[in-house]
Amino acid sequence: MEKILYREGFTAEELPEEIKDRIMGVSYKENPYVKLSDLSYLRVRYYDFEHKVQSGELIVARKLAEEVLDIFYELFEGGYEIEKIKLVDEYDADDERSMADNNSSAFNYRVVADTNTISAHSYGRAIDINPLINPYIVGDKVMPANAVQYADREKSFEHKIDRTDLCYCIFKRHGWKWGGDWRNSKDYQHFYKEYNSPLKMVVRKLKSAIIR
């Protein structure tokens, strides 16, 4: 794809060589499901927690690049505050460290916490927003570990994502799903766009063959 200038400060392009070098062996691992050519590098503007304009970077699925630019432009136009937006490689692709620093990010080839399931982040189809304030909760476990004070979602605090939040409304309008709607766990930071990944299709074929 050619470099897309969506708005001033909002661009999408194929992964530049310097970005490939940054992520290889860190957030990107050799695998049979996701190629570097399946991904796009985005620059977006956002308001930080002091309401100052900043520039952030994201890697997302190439097919979602323009849609993600739409979403972040709408967040920016709405004055929505995000503390920071850096590639997870700034944290050696350590999800816990990135979340603990309240970093909003997208692509990271990894499994879902405490499972062997490949995360939607691996396909660049998930984005975590202000993850320290909007943690992942399963049972008594809170991730990141320093987010315990934000686990009680009945409390009122700034930058909390719920169904009245602008971020929730914008992502939902674009057809994304929210981890805060899950039944067995809650991932309040997590927005994702579903699709039939290659791995899912293989699993479904195997299940179908076993049933027959």
Image (tube, grey):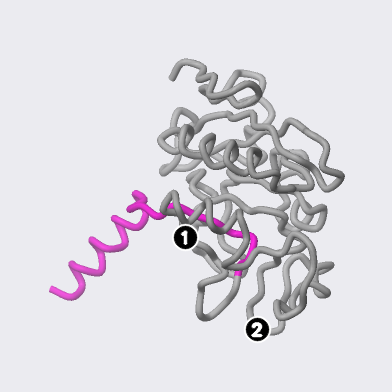
- Which callout, 1 or 2, points to the residue nearer the camera? 1
Label 1 or label 2, whichever comes before in sequence order? 2
Q: Which residues are magenta?
A: 187-212
Q: How many marks?
A: 2
User: Is 171 above or below relative to 4?
Assistant: below
The residue that label 2 is drawn on is 139
Q: Callout 1: 10 Å neighbours few (<14), some, many (20+)?
A: some
User: Is 44 above or below relative to 31?
Assistant: above
* SS under mark 2: loop
The residue that label 1 is drawn on is 177
Taking depth in this image into account, of 6 and 90 the one nearest to the observer is 6
* SS under mark 1: strand
Instruction: Please indicate whether residue 40 sits to the left or right of residue 136 in the image.
Output: left
Residue 62 in which image quadrant: top left
Seen from this angle, which residue lies furthest left? Answer: 212
Instruction: Please indicate whether residue 207 sits to the left or right of residue 12 in the image.
Output: left
* Amino acid type shown at disc 2: Gly
Q: Callout 2: 10 Å neighbours few (<14), some, many (20+)?
A: few
Residue 56 in which image quadrant: top right
> Which residue does the image show at 77% across and 39% down from the upper left?
90
Q: Position of residue 100 (x, y in %)?
A: 80, 58
